[in-house]
Image: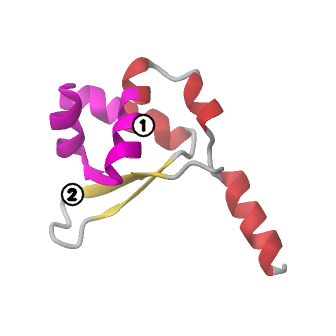
Amino acid sequence: MSAPEAVHRESESRGTWDDVRDLPPSAKLVAKVLEYNDTMTQQQIADETLLPARTVRYGLNRLEEENVIDSRFSFSDARKRLYSLEIAD
């Protein structure tokens, strides 16, 4: 597989704003907060959106199902995950 094919396949697996359009309002709000703040923990998202932690978790799960966010472990605290928006252009 050539490099351009690999990049094209990677972008196909990513979601788009069209995928976010039909999600619940809580997921849309989480996506917008991540768009403006780059990388955040679940608690930071909850603090920023004023949503309960459970609602933020639900929104993050829905966004993960649509492949529009990336999550990874925090190097400073392995108990936490960092979330960032990964939407294909």
Span of residues in magenta: 29-58
Res 56 → quadrant: top left
Task: Report the amino acid beneath label 2.
Answer: Lys
**Residue designated by label 1:** 31
Q: Residue 83 placed where, x, y %?
A: 35, 52
User: As rendered, which of 72 and 89 lies closer to the eye?
Assistant: 89
In contact (CB < 8 Å): disc 1 and disc 2: no
Question: Going from the N terminus, do you reach mark 1 or mark 2 first?
Answer: 1
What's the residue type where badge 1 is placed? Ala
Image-based side of 9 in relation to 46, left or right:
right
The disc label shown at residue 79, or none: none
Residue 26 in picture, x, y percent from top left: 36, 23
Q: Of the numbered discs in the image, which one, if any, rests on residue 80?
A: 2
Q: Is residue 11 left or right of residue 87?
A: right
Front position in the image: 68 or 65: 68
Q: Nearer the viewer, mark 1 or mark 2?
A: 1
Residue 30 on the magenta segment:
yes
Q: Residue at x 42, y 37 (%)?
A: 31
| Mark 2, other Cα within 10 Å: few <14 / some 14–19 / many ≥20 | some
Q: 64 or 2: which is nearer to us?
A: 2
